Image (cartoon, rainbow, N blue to C red):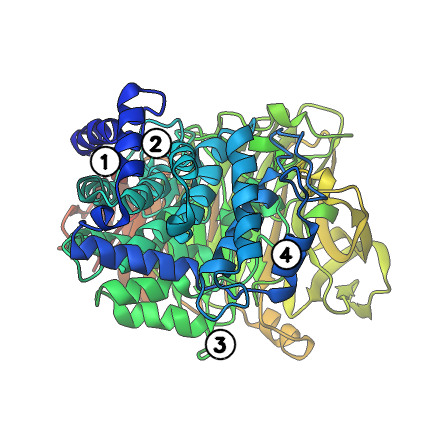
Amino acid sequence: MYMLRNKLNALVVAASLCCVCSEVFANHLRQYTVASQSERILADKDLETIRTRIINDLLQPAVKKEMITELITSFRSDGTWPGINYKDSSRTGFEHRIHLENMLSLARGVRKTGSPFYKDSKAKQTLSDALNFWLKHDFRCENWWWNEMGTPQWMINILLLIDEDLNEYQRAAGLKIAGRANLEAFGARPGGDLLPIAGMLGKQALFTRDSDVLERVIEVMASEIQVTTGRGIKPDLSFHHRTDNVISTLTYGSSFASSFAYWGVKIAGTRFKFPEPALRLLIDYYIDGISRSMVHGIYPDPGAENRDMTRMNALRREGTDLPENLLKISNYRSKELQHIVNLRNGKVLPSSNTNKFFWHSSYLVHDRPTWFASVRMHSSRSSNMEQPHNDEGIRMHHFGDGANFISRRGTEYYNIYPVWNWQMIPGTTVMQKDSLPHWKELAKKGKSSFSGGASDGRYGMAAIDLVSVHDPLGAKKAWFLFDNEYLCLGTDITADKDLPVFTTINQTLLMTPVVAKSNGKQTVLATGDHKLTNVSWIIHDSVAYVFPEPADINLFNRETTGSWRNINHQSWATDDPVKEDVFSLWIDHGRKPAMSGYAYMVVPATSLEALDRYTAKSGIRIIANNPELQAVMNTSAGIAQMVFYTRGEAKLFNSSISAEQPCLVMVSAKGNTLSSVTLSDPTQTLKTLRVYLKGKVVTRTPGFKTTWHEDTGRTLLEADLPQEGFAGQSVTATF
């Protein structure tokens, strides 16, 4: 890949697309701008096909007559539009982008056949004057992204649309600005923005009709579709943009896939087309990485988000462009891609019964036809959260401390974040401070070496021996997920500061009345704040929160107020009050707790009528919840799940399992017959795992060895664990 990049960079320098200040660049521009239109169309047929497709795509949005008319009539003689702050070039400002948007709208209006402004002289003159104004001032932002990606992207799109109307100065100066998107740019990092930047470079090659540069660009793009332990697509098919090992599958990872798929469609059927292996890997990543990180493959899961979730409408329903583009360029896994399209179009209902743990990202997802849950953690191998770049996501200090989201529709947390209490993120155990540390102190290296999950593809579990990076607090937390419910256990909750510690069960939009069963009595709670004792269960929005042992809990179901400015300092985020009705449920462990704990079940897709029947025969049993072992059994499903924080034994009624090292263990049985054992190493340091199973069993699963010990009546199961990029992945033995 680096050889390809070096070859391309050399060619780009020669073609004046990188070294914009060099004499070579000036010579190239002179040669390009003096060439006649006929000479510039000597490029090959494939390039012209791609060029036409790109331009047609840019012309797709509708031309809005009223908007274009307003742009023409309001345009001022000095080359500006009213209402745009042309002085603020800060990271949180840069309203200059509106000027770029206006120019692209005008370009579309004068170029699109059938537009009321097609070849309109006033519209063309307005656009030309607006372009000259930008080229004269060459606006730069304090945020590098605008200088190397945002502005170059807008500029090359404008140039492509009005190529025939440009004068020599506009063509040369515009190309110079567009050329700041190049492979030597700061943002052109492997696995990050390199692919989108390469796409912009490809458009520059189309504009100049340079087949050699276009060919090398496509080679660089194809070489980026690879599995890596660095930046990019990870072996577990999550995505990391930076070296902090924080998941970015739905942010940079989605942009990565979108850029590749977009170009895949544009170059299909030409000699530039992507190789099939690259297409297949991208499709695997999209289906098993991106889509699995969404509620039923439709809505982004908050647990996979970062600072982007503090942008308005960040959790909106996902569109179908990306999977449809993938369907156009390959037949690989086409039925699954079409199913995703159908889900998003509302043509089919969710039907998944899957579980997956992304061991590179400490992120677990659990999908059922009527609900979706996730767990987000951090570890000593990663940061707790990405940096709040550009002053976005400035209150996400505790987001990686075991965030646990439960969704039925995918809209439960939509735009709730301005009014959220960010020290009460669902699933987390957090010391309640007067205020959070400054956002410059938000992202820190994790301290928890024990952080992982185990999954057999249908059922799974996650656990963390949490060491807070912000507070003198520790806790052992585990989640056990099944078909109809999941169980949350916490133990060893200890704090060294005289402040309250809360475990938040949920904090979501208030959608229905809240009903509680407390002290044996069922009550519909009035709007307000409540402190309840001896609670058996709470139900809200068809999700029940069940306490195996009656517990004292706190909740509120009322309106709360906040602002976007409270969580995001971009210029659009104002202090205007935002009001939402919120349901918040939590356990108060008291001030400076020592060895505190909790246990609760989340039962989605239920009702008042079904709840008491469910609790009477759920089959869920807590085997242990102590600092050495957290373990549960689901007798209905024939599954036991165990978190061994140290060497120990779990007694499972008439059976037992012993672990020789800290690990996660999941056992499945059919009747009284053992069917499988799934193991994982949450420390990602072990080469082998050893567990003892009661009775004599034999496995022929590769990577496992069984040894019968007649004297103890137990079988030693030894597992060779995945290494390097696969350390932390689950392994399953069948019997």
Amino acid type indicated by mark 3: Gly
Foreground disc of the pair 4, 3: 3
Upstream in sequence: badge 1 or badge 4:
4
Q: Position of residue 40 (x, y in %)?
A: 24, 46
Q: Quadrant of residue 242?
A: top left
Kindly identify which numbered label has been placed on residue 189.
Answer: 2
- Above or below: residue 528 compared with residue 679: below
- Please tell me how crowded label 1 is: few (under 14), some (14-19), or many (20+) other residues with Cα within 10 Å: some
Kindly identify which numbered label has been placed on residue 346.
Answer: 3
Residue 82 in sight in this render = yes
From the viewer's side, name the closer residue of 641 and 44: 44
Q: Position of residue 246 (x, y in %)?
A: 45, 36
Foreground disc of the pair 2, 4: 2
Amino acid type indicated by mark 4: Tyr
How far, Cα to Cα, is label 1 from label 4? 37 Å
Left of 148 or right of it: where is 519? right
> In what element is the residue under mark 4?
loop
Foreground disc of the pair 3, 1: 3
Residue 388 in sight in this render = no
Q: Residue at x 64, y 70 (%)?
A: 542
> In what element is the residue under mark 2?
loop
From the viewer's side, name the closer residue of 661 and 68: 68
Mark 2–mark 3 CB contact (< 8 Å): no
Kindly identify which numbered label has been placed on residue 413.
Answer: 4
Left of 519 or right of it: where is 631? left
Amino acid type indicated by mark 1: Gln
Residue at the spot of label 1: 723
Q: Residue at x 35, y 32 (%)?
A: 188
> In what element is the residue under mark 1?
loop
Point out the image quarter for the C terminus. bottom left
